[in-house]
């Protein structure tokens, strides 16, 4: 039963609907994204904010974390994918939607070299740039 489960951490800071939550590969952090235009990186054990990314013009729909813990992906409501440094939040790579295909999901490959993107009618693989 759900009522018998021990709660480890609760993350509450988004001002709108949370649309994505993703563990880091070692389980020490969680990345959340929201329709409020924020993406948060949390310490799993303490529930403290490690990094926050805010955008006035974008609603983040999806996030993913690289296996090496150095980068994170966001996919916004315009269909643009951004690869950012977890260290400082700087954009490393930006991939706009192509040929009017709406990007719906993006994930890193296991080795972190590629991004797989799902659209309504296709799956596309991009090479991650450094």
Image: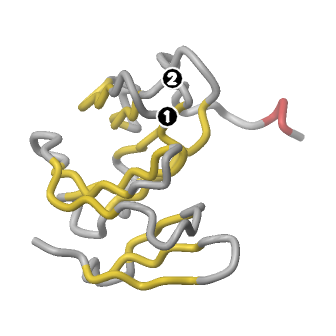
Q: Kindly indicate the quadrant of the structure image that contains residue 81.
A: bottom left
| Coloring applied to the structure | secondary structure
Whole-percent x, y for residue 15 in the image:
54, 14
Q: Earlier in the sequence, mark 1 or mark 2?
A: 2
Which residue carries the number 2 mark?
Answer: 36
| Whether label 1 touches label 2, CB < 8 Å | yes
Whole-percent x, y for residue 83 in the image:
26, 58
Residue 4 in view of the camera: yes
Answer above or below: position of 99 versus 63. below
Judged from the image, the secondary structure of the residue bearing numbered disc 2 is loop
Answer above or below: position of 51 versus 84. above
Which residue carries the number 1 mark?
Answer: 59
Closer to the camera, 11 or 96? Answer: 96
In which quadrant is the N terminus drawn?
A: top right
Query: Along the horizontal axis of the image, is 70 left or right of 5?
Result: left
Closer to the camera, 10 or 55? Answer: 55
Residue 26 in view of the camera: no
Tell me if mark 1 has few (under 14), some (14-19) or many (20+) residues whose alpha carbon lies within 10 angstroms of its own. Answer: many
Whole-percent x, y for residue 68 in the image:
22, 67
Q: Kindly indicate the quadrant of the structure image that contains residue 35.
A: top right
Answer above or below: position of 4 versus 95. above
Report the residue at 13% width, 45% height from top: 90
In which quadrant is the C terminus drawn?
A: bottom left
Total labels: the figure holds 2
Query: Along the horizontal axis of the image, is 122 left or right of 39?
Result: right
Report the residue at 34% width, 48% height from top: 28
Tell me if mark 2 has few (under 14), some (14-19) or many (20+) residues whose alpha carbon lies within 10 angstroms of its own. Answer: some
Report the residue at 53% width, 43% height from top: 77
């Amino acid at each position: 039963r759900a009522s018998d489960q021990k709660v480890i951490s609760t993350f509450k800071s988004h001002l709108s609907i949370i649309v994505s939550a993703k563990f880091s590969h070692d389980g020490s952090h969680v990345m959340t994204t929201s329709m409020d235009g924020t993406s948060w990186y949390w310490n799993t054990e303490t529930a403290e904010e490690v990094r926050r990314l805010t955008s006035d013009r974008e609603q983040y729909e999806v996030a993913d974390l690289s296996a090496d813990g150095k980068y994170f992906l966001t996919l916004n409501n315009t269909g643009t994918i951004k690869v950012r440094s977890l260290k400082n939040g700087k954009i490393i790579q930006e991939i706009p939607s192509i040929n009017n295909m709406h990007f719906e999901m993006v994930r890193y490959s296991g080795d972190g070299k590629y991004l797989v993107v799902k659209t309504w009618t296709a799956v596309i693989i991009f090479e991650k740039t450094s």
